[in-house]
Amino acid sequence: MMPLTMVNTGEPSVIKKVGGKEETRRFLEKLGFVPGGTVTVVSEIEGNLIVNVKDSRVAIGKDMANKIMV
Amino acid sequence: MSIKIALAGNPNCGKTTLFNALTGSNQFVGNWPGVTVEKKEGKLKGHKDVTIMDLPGIYSLSPYTLEEVVARNYLINEKPDAIINIVDGTNIERNLYLSTQILELGIPVIMAVNMMDIVEKSGDKIYVDKLSKKIGCEVVEISALKGTGIQKAAEKAVALAQKNKTSIPVHEFTKDAEDIIERVEDKLVGVVPDAQRRFFAIKLLEKDDKIQDQMNTSVDVSKEIAEMEEKFDDDTESIITNERYTYISSIIGECLKKDRKEKLTTSDKIDKIVTNRWLALPIFAAVMWLVYFVSVTTVGDIATGWANDGVFGDGWHLFGIGTASYTEVADEYTDAETIVNGFLDYESEQGVDVESVQTALDSEADDYDPAAAKAALTEFATTISDADTATYSVVDEETMADEEVTSTGADFQEAVATMDKYDYTAPDPADYGVWIPGIPVLVENVLDKVGCAEWLRGLILDGIVAGLGAVLGFVPQILILFIFLAFLEGCGYMARVAFIMDRVFRKFGLSGKSFIPMLIGSGCGVPGIMASRTIENERDRRMTIMTTTFIPCGAKLPFIAMVAGAIFGGASWVAPSAYFLGIAAIICSGIILKKTKMFAGDPAPFVMELPAYHMPTIGSVLRSMWERGWSFIKKAGTIILVSTIAVWFTTYFGVMDGKFQMLSEDQIDYSILATIGKAICWIFIPQGWGNWQATVASVTGLVAKENIVGTLGILYGGGDASVYATMGAAFTAVSGYSFLAFNLLCAPCFAAMGAIKREMNNTKWFWTAVGYQCGFAYLVSLVVNQIGGLFTGAGFSIWTIVAIAVIVAFIYLLARPYKESQTLNVSVKTSRAK
């Protein structure tokens, strides 16, 4: 398991766990970040990511991305 | 029977495009009561009795964001007759998550799968009949952008509403979960309407803290919650979320056939370049430069010039025909006039009596007669020989700077010849090309014709028309800017801007999108403040609105030039320092404010969905431009108008020669404003410029910042010495900079304040913003004067101690520890379900 920030750009990976506080987790779940789902990092700037999840693109800050384990 | 239909869906799914297509121009835009979430309502085209309500874009019906609470309260309490659930066909799986919740509300639902044109293009296939069966409501395919299928969707929704047949959700969770939900549902019999039982049951199980407010009787479900959490070894909300996604995953295979094999979409390919680690900033800089270049410096500048000097000035040449030839002759005549007047001034200083000549040449006098002017000047000209020289000063109209010029007698004779050529009358622009007189000119002509009273004439021309002009003069530039913003938003780039700039701006409490308002604000604060609309997060938006006008705008430039010229002898560091002061003020304010109670409490994490890149339609760009422009004209217009009239009245009326009367421009010393200035100027004693002239100038600066120059010109002019010399004597370098700092940082002009009021949409926040700006400006200028005075030998006083205390407090506020808020704080008035 590793945080999403460590994943290479363009490689699809499966979400294992979404950590963090309850509210953070809820928010990510609504956007489609659920265990078992696939995410692909499209691009990265200083730890901030744009990821493809359930066919939509989501920009996500470094601190939040660190809580998504793949 | 009137029918209410609500549009609900995820953000970026094309909801607003559909809304516009369904309602056309039949819209009413407002705010949901008590919050700054936009509320849009409209009548369905061709159906006067059908109201369409555009709900804010949401991902779920949980109570975590303002948008969700607003949408949820509307759906539960207002009970629309039908819901059109709009779903983005290109990422249908995620969108269905909301659909499963909407279907539980017990309201007839029709699902509109949008962006079908893109789905078909990519080779994917959505089987709507299967989807319809699996989800439990009618499904139609549409493309809101292309306008296909929308009429059918609307008609079906109306039919559904008339039948009033509730959609029954068919999605099922695992048996264990269903059992528990059913037990809670049983408890709710008689408490909530039958159709809404499942919705309330699930919300209660999810421990939704806002749902109890919607119910008359409280129901205790803690036993069921405990049981569920025990069984699934997770918290209830996550269990239900997972159940929903599991159901969606189980049906999606049948309903959707994907042709893509993990290849990148066009949008992702663009993102690979535009948000690339190395290319993102250069591309962003290039885009910003283009926006700034067009909307502020080139086209925007021309548009503002045209609106201010043309429509609300003397007039303009249609399509610029004749402007060039007129400017040429006008400049020639003005130059000649300057030389002639210079010579007259010089001769007068030498003791020659030229008063009669000067009187005859005064072209602004009511009884000006070109023939008399000619006679007087020709006679005077005979006394000047080619070898004579004259030294005189020429004053720049914009900044009041004066310059020593020396001319020879030969120049003089040539100037006389030039004036002779034009018959001693300044060229009339109306004689060149197609001239359209400005509104003030037209109004003046009408007033002259009806013989209007002097005071009423002043009120109409200098108060109302000038006040309206101050607002409307900015409109063309604002509209140009809004076209750009609408395009950048529509094509999807604006959302990326936040991503690219986020790390930089986050450090001082602003959003990545705050960069745009500040950049625009360096041209004019009004469109700058209005550009803050693209920031979704309310806290970031408010902070941006409060700090944007610290950046010197175009209207402050003549004032900066005046201070630099009159007090600092034209030093070149003054102007750049004004920009540094502005940037420093923004950064410090950001850091200080984000630690205050006011700005704590909202969520900070950065997560946002990015729409796919696509070309916006011209119609949608123009509509967005007009909506924003019009709201400015309407709302900002009132406050500015009233304020301008108030300042006009206090400037032009006062007690002179023992009686209250109307004053002319150069009698401002006797005005009410001057009396007020004299009464309150002590406030600025610690700033080093506690004189009434500076105070009055600062007040007139509220109408428009360039007025400061004009007012100071009147107040410090009129004596023997030049305006610059008098002003230079009235200020020391330190108090001069303090004066500059105050006027750069304090509340902006009325037009910008109107924009602040409009954008804050809340009186308390408006006053907080203006109060903060003025307070900040007051303290900064106090520190500048006192600490500066300490170094230049002004001595130590009680105020020096105050200044030091301010600095210490300031450093404390900057450096004190900061705890990022961890709780979401959404407070919305909820009403009970009826």
Image (cartoon, rainbow, N blue to C red):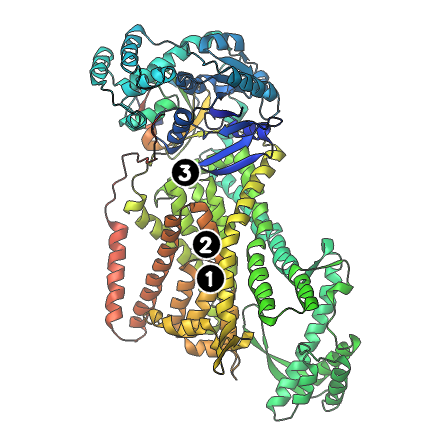
Q: What element carries label 1?
A: loop
Question: Dot 2 corresponds to which residue?
Answer: B753
- Give x and y (percent) for residue B293: 57, 49
Give whichever of discs 1 and 3 has the lower sequence position. 3
Question: Dot 1 corresponds to which residue?
Answer: B702
Question: Relative to residue B570, is residue B283 depicted above or below?
Answer: above
- Give x and y (percent) for residue B727: 46, 76
CA gap, disc 1 and disc 3: 31 Å
Label 2–label 1 contact, CB within 8 A? yes
Foreground pick, B13 / B253: B13
Write down the quadrant of residue B602 in the picture. Answer: top left
Q: Residues within 10 Å of mark 1 (few under 14, many from 20)?
A: many
Label 1–label 3 contact, CB within 8 A? no
> What amino acid is labelled 3 in the image?
Pro
Give whichever of discs 2 and 1 has the lower sequence position. 1
Q: Is residue B665 left or right of residue B827?
A: right
Residue beneath the point at 58% across and 50% down: B475
> What amino acid is labelled 1 in the image?
Leu
Please give the chain letter of the residue carrying mark 3: B
Give whichever of discs 2 and 3 has the lower sequence position. 3
Q: Quadrant of the C terminus of chain B?
A: top left
Whether marks 1 and 3 lie on the same chain: yes
Question: Dot 3 corresponds to which residue?
Answer: B33
Please give the chain letter of the residue carrying mark 2: B
